[in-house]
Image (cartoon, rainbow, N blue to C red):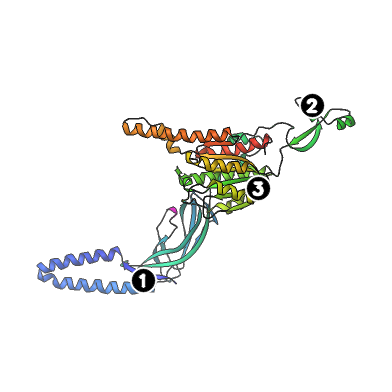
């Protein structure tokens, strides 16, 4: 059901102002009263006729067209098709009621449509938040033939669109991710020729091969030195534990720490799936805890995205022990567990207990995000006492945090302490190094 409401147009307001001025003049010059009365009657007559005419004008038929999925922070085009089904021309202003979690450019738009004419207009939308975007209605403002009134038609037009993390880095990686181009992204894969965990093939012995690789039986049959060639073990399982506590709401640039973690998951997932491994996700410190069983195959990257694209951090404090217990119950097979979080010195006891539990069953890596604002603050000059106190408190905070990171590393836990923008590459490099060295 459409809602209709009307209001005076700027032209009618201007005429009323003229009428008021004439009334003031006629109050001083009585001979002008008759002209004021005639003018008022004409304006009233034309405004009523114009109101009736615009009431009879049918609203335009509007359809919305946009892609089925959007990427957060990326501009996308939305098209509106506007059709005038009246027997006369019309002037209409179109405004699309876009979701509050987005920015738009190019609205509202004014169109001049002849009878039975269809026009297509477009505007740009940039989602600011992952999850579901809901378009509820369109609003069109139809001008009357004499431009004295404007009728507003609220046209229900529902659309639900999914907003995913930005695909662009993964698409770029897909173009570069060959054996000769991994280094272009800073992803370093140190290959050990012929060495690995799984047997690959037999081949002729080459200079630089280890004597342990020689297959003596095959060499005897072929009457020349034959070596075994191995490849990195496949079909391993990678579990990403994502902290959904309040610290991941910290904003660095356009993205939160949680969004940076999702980007890291996206890149790591693509690389691991391409390596033949399985990738799963477990969240903690959130009422909406999610468990995505490890999936295999590059095509299943969408399964990971669909499982977490609408997930947002909550207000709870990190609960590492609870997350570790849940994962141990869910994941029985030995896996590489990557914990993505934002550490504080008061996490020491809880985090150590969680890591100690996970170490019994899995290989554990802790990746902690630093705050860019703290790094920037230390680079600013100290001018007054307040600046000195701020810098001193910052160094105290960082020293306690660094102590926790050192304690984790000294206990044999691979620990990353990086800025949000560096997380994706650091995490992926760590995975490749552990895989190549046979630690997983």
Direction from residue 5 to residue 225 in the image, left or right: right
Say which quarter of the image contains residue 144.
bottom left
The circle drawn on residue 211 is 2
Q: Nearer the viewer, mark 3 or mark 1?
A: 3
Q: Nearer the viewer, mark 3 or mark 2?
A: 2
**Mark 3–mark 1 contact, CB under 8 Å?**
no
Direction from residue 203 to residue 67 in the image, left or right: left
The circle drawn on residue 198 is none
Instruction: Reply yes or no: does residue 324 show up in magenta.
Output: no
Can you name the residue that lies furthest to the top here? Answer: 207
Direction from residue 154 to residue 364 in the image, left or right: right
**Between 107 and 174, which is closer to the camera in this rendering?**
174
**Mark 2–mark 1 contact, CB under 8 Å?**
no
The residue where tag 1 is placed is 54
Q: Could you tell me if residue 417 is visible in this image? A: yes
Instruction: Give the alpha-carbon distance from disc 3 to disc 2, as whole Å.
Output: 36 Å
Instruction: Reply yes or no: does residue 102 show up in magenta.
Output: yes
Is residue 204 placed above or below 67 in the rendered structure?
Answer: above
**Mark 3–mark 2 contact, CB under 8 Å?**
no
- Give x and y (percent) for residue 151: 36, 68
Is residue 61 placed above or below 388 in the rendered structure?
Answer: below
Q: Earlier in the sequence, mark 3 or mark 2?
A: 2
SS of the residue under disc 2? helix
Quadrant location, the N terminus: bottom left
Q: Which residues are magenta?
A: 98-103
Q: Earlier in the sequence, mark 2 or mark 1?
A: 1
SS of the residue under disc 1? helix
- Give x and y (percent) for residue 2: 43, 70
The residue where tag 3 is placed is 298
Instruction: Give the alpha-carbon distance from disc 3 to disc 1, as whole Å.
Output: 57 Å
Q: Earlier in the sequence, mark 3 or mark 1?
A: 1
């Amino acid at each position: 059901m459409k809602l209709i409401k009307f209001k005076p147009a700027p032209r009618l307001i201007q005429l009323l102002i003229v009428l008021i001025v004439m009334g003031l003049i006629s109050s001083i010059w009585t001979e002008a009263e008759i002209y004021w009365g005639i003018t008022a009657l004409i304006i009233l007559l034309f405004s009523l006729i114009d109101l009736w005419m615009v009431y009879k004008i049918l609203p335009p038929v509007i359809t919305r067209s946009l892609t089925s999925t959007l990427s957060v922070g990326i501009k996308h085009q939305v098209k509106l098709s506007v059709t005038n089904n009246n027997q006369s021309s019309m002037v209409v202003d179109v405004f699309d009621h876009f979701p509050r979690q987005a920015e738009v450019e190019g609205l509202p738009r004014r169109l001049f449509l002849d009878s039975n004419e269809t026009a297509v207009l477009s505007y740009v939308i940039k989602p600011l938040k992952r999850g579901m975007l809901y378009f509820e209605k369109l609003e069109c403002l139809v001008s009357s033939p004499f431009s004295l009134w404007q009728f507003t038609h609220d046209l229900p037009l529902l659309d639900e669109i999914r907003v995913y993390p930005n695909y662009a880095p993964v698409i770029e990686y897909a173009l570069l991710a060959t054996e000769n181009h991994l280094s272009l992204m800073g992803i370093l894969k140190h290959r050990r020729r012929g060495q690995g965990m799984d047997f690959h093939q037999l081949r002729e012995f080459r200079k630089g091969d280890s004597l342990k690789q020689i297959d003596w039986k095959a060499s005897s049959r072929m009457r020349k030195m034959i070596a075994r060639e191995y490849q990195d073990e496949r079909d391993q399982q990678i579990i990403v534990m994502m902290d959904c506590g309040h610290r991941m709401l910290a904003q660095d640039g356009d993205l939160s720490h949680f969004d940076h973690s999702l980007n890291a998951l996206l890149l790591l997932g693509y690389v691991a799936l391409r390596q033949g491994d399985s990738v799963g996700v477990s969240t903690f410190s959130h009422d909406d805890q999610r468990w995505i069983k490890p999936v295999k195959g590059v095509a299943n990257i969408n399964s990971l995205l669909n499982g977490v694209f609408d997930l947002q951090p909550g207000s709870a404090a990190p609960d590492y022990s609870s997350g570790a217990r849940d994962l141990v119950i869910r994941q029985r097979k030995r896996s590489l567990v990557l914990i993505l979080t934002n550490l504080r010195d008061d996490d020491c006891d809880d985090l150590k207990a969680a890591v100690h539990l996970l170490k019994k069953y899995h290989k554990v890596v802790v990746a902690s995000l630093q705050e860019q604002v703290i790094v920037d603050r230390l680079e600013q000059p100290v001018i007054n006492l307040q600046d000195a106190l701020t810098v001193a408190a910052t160094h105290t905070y960082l020293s306690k945090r660094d102590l926790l990171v050192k304690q984790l590393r000294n206990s044999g836990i691979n620990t990353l302490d990086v800025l949000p923008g560096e997380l994706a590459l650091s995490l992926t490099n760590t995975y490749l190094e552990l895989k190549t060295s046979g630690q997983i």
